Amino acid sequence: MTGRKDQTKEQKRSMETFLNICLSITSQTDREQLLSDILDKAMELNNCDAGTLYLLEDDGLHFCRMVTKSIGLRQGGHDDPIGFPPVPLQPQYVSSYSVMHNEPVHIDSVRDDERFDFSGSMRYDEMTGYFTGTMFVVPLANDKGELIGAVQLINALPDGVKTVRKEDLEKTVVGFRPEIELLTNAMASLAAISLTNMQYSQQIRELLSSLVRALSTAIDQRTPYNANHTRNMVKYGEKFIDWLSASGKSTKDLNFDNGKRDAFLMSVWLHDVGKLVVPLEVMDKSSRLGPKLDDVLGRLRIIGLLTRIDALEGRIPAEDAEARLAELGDISEFIKKVNTQGFLPDPDLARVMELGERTFTDENGEVHKWLTDEEFTDLQVRKGTLTAEERQIMESHVTATAKILSEVFFPKQYENTPVWAAMHHELLNGKGYPNHLLGKDADGQDIYEEDKKKENVMKKVIPDEVRLLTILDVFDALTARDRPYKPGMPVEKALSILHSMVEEGSMDGNILALFEESKAWEV
């Protein structure tokens, strides 16, 4: 009766160990740690001294993890690769046989077993003084029946014995308990499913990332400077986030733990995707007039020819003709200057307004303006190259970004990605677009609103992630040296402009200070 109670108690203990192992494996989110856990938990369940985890690839079973407690060996992982060649998929090798036939294999005595080639184990024993006695190999097969590897367990220990000296192994090791086989097989299957699901999850993330990069490439094909802009922002963002973490300056609102780093960087990649629908003549407009400059200069040449004809036919004095021709030359140079000028000062704007009123009469007696209405509007642009109408078209890329991304399914980890991407032109003083959101009230305090669940938790109207994204966007726009419409600024001048935007209430000064301290542009 006592023996039956002990057996029941042992079964209960094994089941509890098994259930704890299952919980540990299924809750693990780090692949490298999961691989280590699979071997460690299999050894724990079977109370053995050593084990090896193999992963199946095309050319055989690759050593992934190795543990031998009696000699203090633990090897495997990215920073500690195992240098052994893979085990060929041939049935004379016990681990390969187990995988090829998808069945567990018990070896009660490695030295007496004639079914498999254990020469490798014997050589290892000779080199290290180890003793390989008993063995249990379990294949790793997922829920689809796909074989992904094997766990090879070595030298089971008696109940109650957790560690043993290498010298005592030969007289201590026992056979692996058959009653644990079912639990070990179940654990191996669960581990294989967890690995497969983790691989699927990684593949989905890589698919999503590759699609994002493909969209950026599509923008690159339309306008190379914009893709450089996005890539630069990603580089700055990566370095800033790494610096923020390493420096310990993450805050409750500005941190990139638990996958938020990937979600934020994806929002950077996607923030300008709406420019796919912006006409190139607007997006790449490098001057006020663009191709219309040739029309204006050609018209001025025609006016000059008509002036010469008038002089030759005696309709105007020669000296008046020469004066008009000189003026036309001066006007041509003035228009070429204004066409590419960064800012149009008041005297130049006044001269443009005067030119807009000028007319000439052609050979048929018809009266024409020197500048068409469209050309006149273009030349009146005070800053940059876009008219008010063109700027509206350009700014519509944010709305287009939101619309495009609304059609994409983002997993929970990336649920904020489209929101952040579509808000990158919002400013804290409400002067951004498209929704003119506010970040601070009149007293400079952050404005809050209830969250979607209507709980007592509050959130900023413009999240810190968006505030950082906006700083990255403006900084690169100011410093970029490949824009067709302006030269790049030195970093110091760009930072000075950003600080002025902080003073006017449109930028977050705390985040800008962190960005400046990180020197993330020094990539």
Image: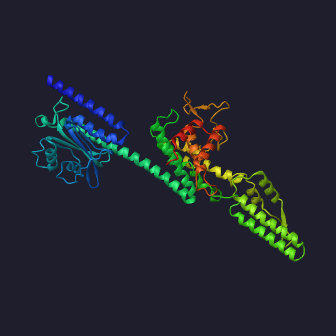
Whether residue 407 is visible here, answered yes or no, is no
For the point 39% across and 47% down, which residue is it? 200
Seen as rendered, the residue at the extreme left is 112
- Label tally: 0
| Nearer to me, 318 or 218 | 318
For the point 51% across and 33% down, which residue is it? 251
Q: Horizontally, is 171 left or right of 226 in the view?
A: left
Image position, residue 377 (x, y; %) = 75, 56
Whether residue 469 is visible here, answered yes or no, is yes
Q: Is the residue 368 above or below the residue 312 in the image?
A: above
Image position, residue 396 (x, y; %) = 64, 50
Q: Horizontally, is 203 left or right of 227 in the view?
A: left
**Colour setup of the view:** rainbow
Q: Quadrant of the N terminus?
A: top left
For the point 11% across and 42% down, which residue is it? 109
Image position, residue 130 (x, y; %) = 15, 41
Q: Is the residue 83 above or below the residue 154 in the image?
A: below
Q: Quadrant of residue 157?
A: top left
| Nearer to me, 434 or 455 | 434
Q: Quadrant of residue 418?
A: top right
Q: Is the residue 124 above or below the residue 169 in the image?
A: below
Image position, residue 499 (x, y; %) = 62, 40
Seen as rendered, the residue at the extreme bottom is 313
For the point 55% across and 56% down, which residue is it? 219
